[in-house]
Image: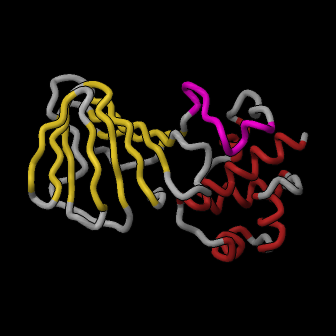
Amino acid sequence: MTEAADLWLGMQIRDLRKTNRFSLQHLADKSGLSVGLLSQIERGLTSPSIRSLRQLSEALGVTPARFFHQETPPPPAEIGRIVRRGKGRQLRLSGNGVAKWLMTPDLSGELEMLLVEIAPGGKSGNELYTHKGEECGYVISGAMQIWIDEESFLLREGDSFRFKSTTPHRFESASDGMTLVLWVITPPLY
């Protein structure tokens, strides 16, 4: 592999590990690879063998083809910095009418930016929920109802919001069409 391809592959493996909320040690235990080797692979310092890639794929719950789906890796200067149009990674979520695309290049930063698509009738759930951090967003198109500490707000195209994530909250579509929201969360949730 080229150096750029090694960096790109390592970033994908690290992001999948973090998405699954696995520590390096947990992934090492699941895959049968050493923590040191995993660390080197994630940092792009070494290329995994096909056998190691199969072990990692199985431990992460993906097929090895997942790592070769990208047509070409981005230029080295873009890795970890830039996400090009149409290249955001869709997050795996339950079927609630909400699709989320990770628009930050990786999960190593202090915040994450998501493009959230809410179908008519889509919602985060029936119950208010909390987690650590802070979030803000901007409604690109459509409309959504958001509950923050049991107060309900109707947000339309061009409206924005911000709140502490420790405040109980939830959201749902308030539109007959798709609603698009640019959503930023710190620290990263996925």
Q: Is residue 85 shown in magenta?
A: yes
Q: Nearer the viewer, residue 186 or 44?
A: 186
Position in image of residue 154 (x %, y %) = 12, 38
Which residues lie in the magenta part?
A: 76-87
In which image quadrant can residue 149 be found?
Answer: bottom left
Residue at the left extreme, as displayed: 151
- Total numbered labels: 0
- Relative to 172, say whether 11 is above or below: below
The colour scheme used to paint the residues is: secondary structure
Position in image of residue 137 (x %, y %) = 33, 42
Q: Nearer the viewer, residue 93 or 84?
A: 84
In which image quadrant can residue 27 be found?
Answer: bottom right
Q: Is residue 35 shown in magenta?
A: no
Tell whether 22 sits left or right of 178: right
Q: Nearer the viewer, residue 64 or 160?
A: 160
Position in image of residue 180 (x %, y %) = 32, 30
Q: Residue at x 67, y 49 (%)?
A: 12
Q: Residue at x 31, y 62 (%)?
A: 165
Position in image of residue 136 (x %, y %) = 34, 48
Q: Residue at x 25, y 49 (%)?
A: 124
Tell whether 69 sits left or right of 174: right
Q: Nearer the viewer, residue 176 or 65?
A: 176
Q: Quadrant of the N terminus?
A: top right
Q: Residue at x 27, y 38 (%)?
A: 160
In which image quadrant can residue 176 be found?
Answer: top left
